[in-house]
Image (tube, rainbow, N blue to C red):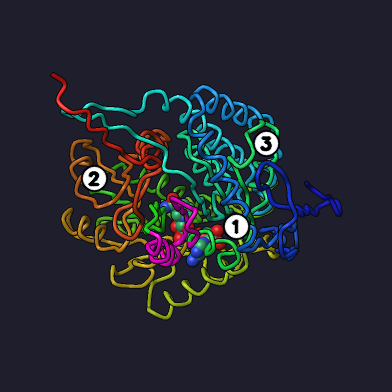
């Protein structure tokens, strides 16, 4: 139930468990802050291990019937949610712009538009999945894994919740979702829509709370069969270790430090334009952001001029203003972390081309950091290696193609990347040498049907499309014996 306590205040006083809104066991609340104001925007319950027990028990009870329900029934309910979300695009977009700080146009298109599209892809793909196959004398069948705990980050708050919940429910699993404590409010609206759509009790459960109050009890819970996590690599390591105690399946979508390789024959202006836009989208709080721009050493000066020209186009301000195209960071803690990265880079001797620790002009309140660019960065510097998760670009010069590939691959991460060349075959050759989950060649659109996920410490498992859906199944071999 929503309680409105003031013009700008959203108070959600209960958790969604077993088909209804219930008060949390402890009665503690968490404040949610507006990213552009720093003021309290809403409150949500800080759940407890007892709430986790209730939600997991409800999801377990619901699993046999839900997993056995006809596919049309499951997909029909998901279609209903898709329609309800489409009717609420503006409300959801404004809410996410307020709590995350994403400029409103990007919120409409990406923060809300993408999850609606993703739900549609699940509905389209489900009937085509290879659920059963005959292998020799065996019939190999896929069965939904069971109860999924979905734990998400704040930056694309609704997409991460819907991407996981939609896939789990479409495949016949039941789900307990814990959104980020930084930006949980859109998940509550989503839960309202799930309730309105009429899913059976226990199929979908929402618990708000922190890593300690709800996240860790969920990961440790013996009644959870799979953890589907999006967040930092540091948390991913802890979750992997904790989930191993009960040998759960774990899908981890973690951090990145993606390289944008601009080859010597590329259209420099276009590559820099798209590269800058990619790095600074959502103020750099995008796991796939191309935060390392690798450029031929003899073109460094030209690239710097082009980057500076692109920065002139950023207007920081209220994310709800249609003219704003650069918003704040999601939280005060994130703002401090990003400033620390910038200070360390300066202390290490990295050359600052633009920005710095100060907020951009016209943005005194809220969690702003100006678009920041370091140039002539050495690959061994911290700013070339560590994920900042903020609006900070490192321009790294290289000598030849082999060196560019070597620098790109010299990372603990491997989530995304880009290659630019006038010769598409050359670009593809270089892209194939990159040890990373996705590579955009000469700029391209996000494809929600393609598998999404990372190599190395960017994660394990894949999300989205057929490959993402197949993560939610167990395999069973029915040994049928000789057929003749
Ligand atoms: P975070 O790891 O701090 O928190 C993410 C979620 O996990 C939150 O809900 C948090 O409460 C919970 N959590 C943290 N530690 C936990 C633990 N030990 N047990 C259980 N739950 C725990 O991440 P964040 O700061 O919210 O998000 C930013 C990070 O997410 C960045 O590193 C970014 O690259 C990454 N990210 C990755 C993807 C991807 O798809 N690969 C997408 C978006 C963000």
Task: Tell me if mark 2 has few (under 14), some (14-19) or many (20+) residues whose alpha carbon lies within 10 angstroms of its own.
Answer: many
- Above or below, 480 relative to 285: above
Q: What is the quadrant of residue 365 in the picture?
A: bottom right
Task: Give percent across and percent down for residue 300.
Answer: 31, 59
> Mark 3 or mark 1, which is nearer the start of the sequence?
1
Task: Give percent across and percent down for residue 161.
Answer: 55, 46
SS of the residue under disc 3: helix
226 or 39: nearer the eye? 226
Q: Nearer the viewer, mark 2 or mark 3?
A: 3
Q: Which residue is mark 2?
A: 431
Which residue lies at the image location 42% right of the left edge and 60% below the top edge?
393
Residue found at the far top of this picture:
484
Which residue lies at the image location 57% right of the left edge and 68% below the top edge?
212
Q: What is the quadrant of residue 154 in the picture?
A: bottom right
> Mark 3 or mark 2, which is nearer the start of the sequence?
3
Q: Which residue is mark 3?
A: 193
> Mark 2 or mark 1, which is nearer the start of the sequence?
1
- From the image, which quarter does the C terminus lie in? top left
């Amino acid at each position: 139930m929503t309680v409105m306590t003031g013009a700008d205040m959203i108070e959600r006083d209960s958790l969604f468990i077993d088909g209804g809104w219930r008060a949390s066991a402890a009665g503690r609340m968490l404040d949610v802050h507006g990213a552009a104001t720093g003021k309290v925007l809403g409150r949500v319950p800080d759940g407890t291990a007892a709430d986790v027990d209730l939600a997991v028990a409800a999801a377990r009870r619901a699993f046999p019937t839900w997993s056995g329900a006809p596919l049309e029934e499951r997909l029909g309910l998901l279609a209903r949610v898709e329609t309800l979300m489409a009717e609420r695009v503006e409300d959801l977009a404004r809410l996410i712009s307020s709590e995350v700080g994403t400029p409103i146009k990007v919120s409409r298109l990406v923060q809300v538009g993408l999850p609606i599209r993703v739900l549609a892809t699940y509905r389209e793909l489900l009937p085509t999945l290879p659920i059963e196959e005959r292998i020799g004398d065996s019939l190999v069948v896929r069965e939904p894994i069971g109860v999924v705990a979905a734990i998400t980050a704040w930056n694309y708050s609704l997409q991460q919740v819907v991407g996981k919940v939609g896939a789990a429910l479409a495949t016949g699993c039941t789900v307990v979702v814990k959104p980020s404590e930084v930006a949980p409010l859109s998940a509550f609206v989503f839960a309202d829509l799930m309730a309105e759509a009429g899913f059976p009790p226990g199929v979908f459960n929402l618990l708000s709370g922190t890593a300690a109050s709800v996240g860790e009890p969920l990961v440790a819970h013996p009644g959870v069969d799979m953890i589907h996590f999006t967040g930092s690599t540091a948390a991913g390591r802890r979750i992997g270790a904790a989930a191993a105690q009960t040998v759960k399946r774990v899908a981890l979508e973690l951090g990145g430090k993606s390289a944008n390789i601009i080859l010597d024959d590329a259209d420099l202006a276009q590559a820099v334009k798209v590269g800058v836009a990619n790095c600074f989208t959502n103020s750099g709080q995008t796991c796939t952001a191309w935060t390392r721009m690798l450029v031929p050493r003899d073109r460094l000066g030209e690239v710097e001029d082009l980057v500076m020209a692109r920065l002139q186009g950023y207007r920081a301000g209220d994310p709800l203003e249609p003219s704003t195209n650069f918003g704040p960071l999601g939280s005060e803690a994130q703002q401090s972390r990003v400033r620390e990265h910038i200070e360390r880079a300066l202390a290490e001797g990295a050359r600052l081309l633009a920005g710095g620790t100060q907020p951009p002009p016209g943005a005194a309140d809220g969690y702003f950091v100006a678009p920041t660019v370091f140039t002539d960065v050495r690959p061994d510097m911290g700013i070339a290696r560590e994920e900042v998760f903020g609006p900070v670009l490192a321009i790294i010069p290289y000598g030849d193609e082999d060196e560019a590939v070597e620098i790109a691959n010299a990372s603990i991460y491997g989530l995304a990347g880009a290659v630019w060349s006038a010769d598409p075959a050359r670009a593809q050759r270089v892209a194939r040498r990159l040890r990373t989950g996705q590579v955009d060649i000469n700029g391209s659109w996000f494809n929600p049907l393609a598998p999404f996920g990372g190599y190395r410490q960017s994660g394990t498992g894949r999300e989205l499309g057929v490959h993402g859906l197949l993560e939610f199944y167990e395999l069973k071999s029915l040994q049928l014996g000789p057929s003749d």
